[in-house]
Image (cartoon, rainbow, N blue to C red):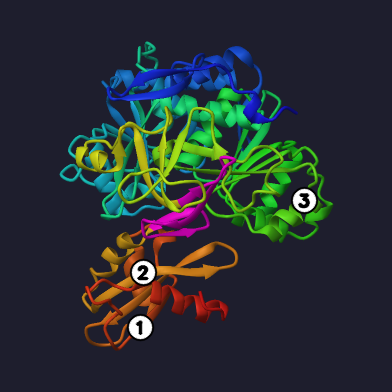
Amino acid sequence: MKMWDDTWPAMRLEAHYNDRVVRCFEKRPSSLYQLLVDAQAKNPNGIALVCEEKRLTYTQLLKASSQLSGAMTSKGIVSGDRIALMLGNRIEFIVVLFAAARIGVISVPLSIRDQKPGISYALAHCGARAVFHETELSGLLPGAKEAPDLMYRISMQACAGSDEYKQWIKINHASTVAHVQEDDTAVILYTSGTTGRPKGAMLTNLSIVHSSMHYQIGMGLTTQDCSIVTVPLSHVTGLVALITTMVLSACKLIIMPQFKAAAFLKSAVEEQMTHTLMVPAMYNLCLLEKDFGKIDLSAWRVGAYGGAPMPVATIEKLAVTVPSLMLMNCYGSTETTSPATLMPQGKTANHNDTVGISLACVDMCVVDDYGIQLPHNQMGEIWIKGPMVVKGYWNNPEATAENFIAGYWRSGDLGSLDEQGYIKVLDRKKDMINRGGYKIYTIEVENALYEHPAIQECAVVAKPCEVLGERVHAFISLKSSPITDQELKTFCQSRLSDYKVPESFTFLQTPLPRNANGKLMKRLMRDEITELTTGKSK
């Protein structure tokens, strides 16, 4: 197989988003919706989606999306409107996504693990006209006062206060494919920030198409491939690395409502899975399955991972048990529409301490605190530019101005770049916990804890974990009477996504440690919990 960096198609410089000049592929699909149109033309009878007992061909997926877009049009939802998706991993998520894209409507996927405050904020902030939701989540939807633009609620099953999805897809109303621009926003993904308020990253047709092409070409995907999506479809990885990349490739995507190693391996064998993109913890759980080494996974050739480092021991075990598997590290974020780097094929063993090299249309640099480029192998902040970088944050010009400079996104990650172009991510400038690939900004957890009347002050830090990499730990200084771990967990569960809830606590009778300037010394607290957990000083 040719190396992926030898197979990129022709590129050229183009002006986008008013003030950026970026390197783009000359020939490319024109929009998110065009990806599906092209896939149906290329592989009309090929299986597009599989979820439990349901299977859709590309022709059926295109028809279902067209039918639903007609229903949206009949309800007065027009190009530029926003619709929210509070849906888990299911075929309907993808039907809604492409139905919206067909008529130029912006999709706003929301995590089904979020709680009412976050959901209410996102729906109101983006001005969503409709929300497609899981039936059991209806109680988390805001009232008319909190989300005045929300006209329609569509549930997957019959539900008080919502229309039923199957009634919408029966509506017989024609829709016209909208004429959208590449720079138009196609999807808004809400991502937490250091202020604790989510920011709506605007993924455009241009950014989604380029990221999908980076994945497809970099991994050598064709119509013969088959992938299993185990991460949430509402996250940028599920949305772009799996949905749009597989549609661009016109291949088969198996949808798992939730990851269970045994069920994943069973599907992998039955469907002849060739590709995955998962967090390292999922690979570890597969290795722990009984008789893993005896399962026929010979079709599995691409094992991509991101969100956390892959332990060397895991790489070595997979090399023995699945010799056909080529592991490929990816590095990116919501703001880069997923990938900014990818490990070249066959290079993981020699460069496991890196996240690979920049993709074809990506420009990356490492700068100091003054924005001056640093020499090779010196640590600084990683800045990223390219057509896949989002154009900014929805209705938030202040955050856009703060985080984007001349088209470069300031990642907040500290890293270095070597002479061969390999990127190391060494630390996080932004205070963040990485729990099995889920990014948790500590200030959001701290803000929730501070709502409890018994808490004087708190600090949230990462606690080492062999399986997930890091877990959420909180140091607490109380105002008065003692409080139990479970009481605090229950308190947080009504305010935070479940993976953000602290799993352990340290209660102090003294104030939290601060330096001479009054700033919390989180490093001391991280060192303390690391030593208690692992027996080693950090």
Q: Which mark is residue 319?
A: 3
The kind of residue tagged 3 is Ala
The residue range painted magenta reads 415-440
The kind of residue tagged 2 is Val
The kind of residue tagged 1 is Phe
Callout 1: few (<14), some (14-19), or many (20+) C-alpha neighbours within 10 Å?
A: some
Q: Given the current orientation, which residue lies at the most extreme front position?
A: 375
Residue 430 sits inside the magenta stretch: yes
When the figure is inspected, residue 50 is found, relative to residue 7, above or below; the finding is below
Residue 363 found in image quarter: top left
Residue 491 found in image quarter: bottom left
Report the predominant secondary structure element of the magenta stretch: strand
Label 3: element kind = helix
Disc 2: which residue: 460
Tell me how many marks there are: 3
Image position, residue 385 (x, y; %)? 41, 34
Say which of 363 and 152 sits in front: 363
The structure residue drawn at horizontal position 60% and vertical position 23%, both measured from the top left corner, is 8
Say which of 258 and 208 sits in front: 208
Q: Which mark is residue 507?
A: 1
